[in-house]
Image: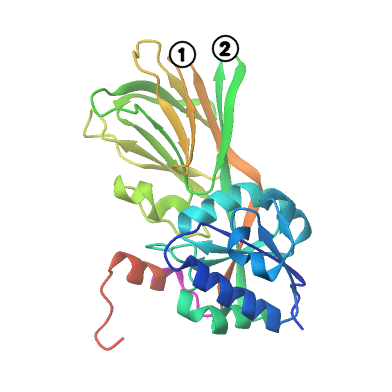
Amino acid sequence: MTKFKKIGITGREGTGFGDSLKVLVSVLAKHKVDVYVCESIAPLLAKCKLPVCRLSKIGEICDLIIVLGGDGSLLGAVRILARHNVPVLGINRGTLGFLTDILPEEIETRVGAVLNGEYTEEKRFLLSAQVRRGGELIGRAEALNDVVVNSGTSAQMIEFDLFVDDEYVYRQRSDGLIISTPTGSTAYSLSAGGPIMHPKLDAVVLVPMFPHTLSSRPILVDGNSEIKIVINDSNEIHPSVTCDGQVQITSMPGDTIYVKKKRHKMKLIHPLDHSFYASCRDKLGWVSRLGK
């Protein structure tokens, strides 16, 4: 008997999505669990007559959420689900799939194994970002991968002051700054020259985007640090603050951006043979030993 009695399904529709969804529902039916479907994908399962809920409600009532899609689908779901402390399992219908590590053709065997208790669980922390103007809260959002402050245009740099735990670090002119969790270190941060961080690290990396000085390099700080970015009054543009590339807040010169670890963590479920380094070899094209 599986410990997961109520399982929710969410995801983002794309090529082949419907076929994978039907296979997944069939596997769950064999294990005699209660299945709840997110309203965004419910039309694909109209004939099954499964209960349909908002994702936030599914997070409240279920003890496992399965996300069918790419990493972007999982990122969007986790920002809603983290507060409910419910574990998440990802099935990859995207491209790289660092977070969604079950392939469509493996649904029957690997999801079945997870339901039989054959899995590992790890916790990933999220970031909370706030934009304040004269002390007033303008906007807030959360991120599992990264918070990015950038000019929003390739034609102009922005100038800002960086503080870590209220200690002044530097003034920088650049296209912006990426504030990344270990989870996000294999995403946008990596493209900008940031380090790859093991998911178990309790740290945040600050990666400058095309800085106007050769000495500006990524900085690794404690995961419990509060990052403060002050957008200088001299700027003529309104920098954007983007969380996971999906939620955007527009700031203005003089605004202050605060970024720190969110209290709630994400629980990520993996098959037993999951390996972070094997994922890097596979997704990033690292060379393996001959015959391995």
Q: Residue at x 30, y 49 (%)?
A: 191
Answer whether residue 226 is visible to the viewer in this image.
Answer: no
How far apart are the alpha carbons under marks 1 and 2? 8 Å
Magenta-highlighted residues: 272-277
Residue 247 in view in this figure: yes
Residue 184 in picture, x, y percent from top left: 45, 51
Label 1: few (<14), some or many (≥20) within 10 Å?
some
> With 235 as the anchor, is 243 left or right in this view?
right
The residue at 63%/80% (across/down) is: 27
* Marker disc for residue 134: 2
For residue 253, which quarter of the picture? Answer: top left
Question: Does residue 140 appear left or right of residue 32 in this picture?
Answer: left
Q: Are marks 1 and 2 in contact (CB under 8 Å)?
A: yes
**Magenta segment includes 33:** no
Tell me the residue that label 1 is attached to: 254
- Figure quadrant of residue 236: top left
Q: Quadrant of the N terminus?
A: bottom right
> For the C terminus, which image quadrant?
bottom left
Amino acid type of the residue tagged 1 in the rendering? Gly
Give the amino acid type for the residue marked by disc 2 in the picture. Gly
Q: Eyeballing the image, is 75 above or below 46?
A: above
Q: Earlier in the sequence, mark 1 or mark 2?
A: 2
Q: Secondary structure at mark 2?
A: loop
Q: Position of residue 247 (x, y in %)?
A: 50, 37
The secondary structure making up most of the magenta span is loop
